[in-house]
Image (tube, grey):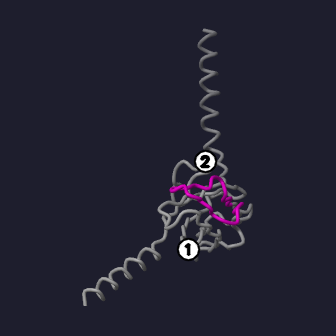
């Protein structure tokens, strides 16, 4: 009975060890720190990111990159507004743990993306997934009303006139 329990315990540990995924995160372009979530992109803007992994089960793992772009409902977004390019086919840390692929992820937002759009970008290397929420910053510019500009200009002209008049006296 002890032998069966020992074998069962070893099997559970082995299964937990193989199911244990490494920790991954999206880092800044330089690969020095994790990026804040959500990321805000202006329409037409591109940002570069790094992929960071730690706690690998085995050294020299080769894990293929993949990604998915999902438009969040109710934001007017379309998945085709977002372009993701990963410059390498695989995440290959070798024996380094942790390891960062510096500057391999490029996320671009199209010029005509909606100002209120929100997307979820999922980057995967092997079995580990990291998700970023990306939102578009409002790109609507307001032209101030006439009195908002006219009053300060009139005040400056009036002050200049007053100073000139006082100087003449």
What residue do we see at 72% from left, 72% from top?
80
Chain-order first, disc 2 or disc 1: 2
Question: Do the CB atoms of the residues marked 2 and 1 lie less than 8 Å apart?
Answer: no
Nearest the viewer among 126 and 74 is 126
Q: Residue furthest top?
A: 169
Q: CA distance from mark 2 to mark 1?
A: 24 Å
In the structure shown, which secondary structural element does the residue marked by tag 1 occupy? loop
| Residue 42 figure quarter | bottom right
Q: Is residue 87 magenta-colored?
A: yes
Magenta residues?
Answer: 86-107
Q: Residue at x 48, y 71 (%)?
A: 21
Q: Residue reaching furthest left?
A: 2
In the rendered image, the residue lying farthest to the front is: 3
**Which quarter shows the N terminus?**
bottom left
Q: Nearer the viewer, residue 105 or 137?
A: 105
Name above or below for residue 146 compared with residue 71: above
x and y percentages locating residue 110 in the rendered image: 73, 63
Q: Position of residue 161 (x, y in %)?
A: 64, 21
Q: Main secondary structure of the magenta part?
A: strand
Instruction: From the image, tell me which residue sits under label 2.
Output: 30
Q: Nearer the viewer, residue 109 or 97?
A: 97
Q: Is residue 22 magenta?
A: no
Q: Which mark is residue 127?
A: 1
Answer left or right for 112 relative to 151. right
């Amino acid at each position: 009975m002890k032998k069966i329990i020992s074998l069962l315990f070893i099997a559970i540990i082995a299964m937990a060890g193989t199911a244990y995924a490494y920790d991954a995160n999206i880092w800044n372009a330089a690969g020095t720190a994790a990026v804040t979530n959500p990321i805000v992109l202006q329409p037409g803007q591109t940002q570069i990111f790094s992929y960071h992994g730690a706690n690998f089960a085995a050294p020299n793992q080769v894990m293929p990159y993949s990604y998915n772009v999902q438009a969040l409902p109710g934001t007017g977004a379309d998945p085709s507004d977002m372009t993701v390019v990963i410059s390498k086919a695989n995440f290959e840390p070798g024996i380094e743990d942790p390891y960062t692929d510096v500057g391999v992820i490029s996320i671009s937002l199209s010029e005509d993306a909606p100002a209120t759009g929100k997307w979820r970008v999922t980057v995967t290397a092997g079995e580990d997934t990291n998700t970023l929420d990306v939102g578009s910053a409002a790109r609507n510019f307001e032209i101030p009303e006439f009195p908002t500009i006219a009053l300060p200009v009139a005040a400056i002209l009036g002050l200049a006139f007053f100073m000139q008049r006082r100087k003449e006296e």
